[in-house]
Image (spheres, grey):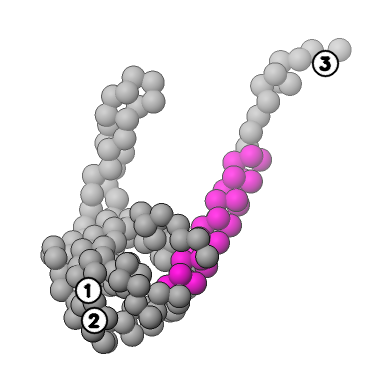
Amino acid sequence: MMRPERENWAAALSAADNGKVAALADRIRARAEVEPLVPPREGLMLMQLRDSVAGAAFHLGEIPMARVHLRLTVPEGAAEGGAALMSDDLALVTRLAILDAALMADLPEAPEIEALLAAGMAARTEVQARRALALDRTRVDFQLLSEDEA
């Protein structure tokens, strides 16, 4: 399997089966030392965007955000992992960071993590396809509206 870019791992894993993600991360945590490198954070973040015409910055609003950066140490080695997600579920984001570190360390659980990544990417692709279909149904051809009906 071709791994997606690391920046997409958290989003893909969050779209995978929550129970499987939790069970796998908890199994890794049970045999590892997990050390936070930065205090885990959750809360509201002000989302800033740029106007597409004038390029002026504006604040869209607040979104829930959780971030975790940790070091995972097991007998096979150590690796740093992290996750940031638009979510207020700090436990989930911590589990995603553990899986991120475990995959970077190429632990024996790596094939299971890759399977979860593949399932999550498939789920995300399906959602994107449904959204594209819904968007396509709202498309209007204004040229047809202006033609004479003679």
Residue pointed to by mark 2:
74
Q: Residue at x 64, y 33 (%)?
A: 139
Q: Amino acid at mark 1?
A: Ala
Q: Main secondary structure of the magenta part?
A: helix
Residue at disc 1, secondary structure: strand
Please state the horizontal and vertical placement of residue 91, each as a whole percent of the image: 28, 72
Residues 117 and 126: in front is 117
Badge 3 or badge 1: first in the primary sequence: 1
Q: Is there CB contact under 8 Å for labels 2 and 1?
A: yes
Q: Which mark is residue 149?
A: 3
Q: Is residue 103 above or below residue 61?
A: below
Q: Is residue 70 left or right of residue 99?
A: left
**Where, quadrant-wise, is the C terminus in this rendering?**
top right
The stretch in magenta equals 113-137
Q: Which mark is residue 35?
A: none
Q: Is there CB contact under 8 Å for labels 2 and 3?
A: no
Badge 2 or badge 3: first in the primary sequence: 2
Q: Amino acid at mark 3?
A: Glu
Q: Residues within 10 Å of mark 1 (few under 14, many from 20)?
A: some
* Residue closest to the far front: 76
Q: Which mark is residue 78?
A: 1
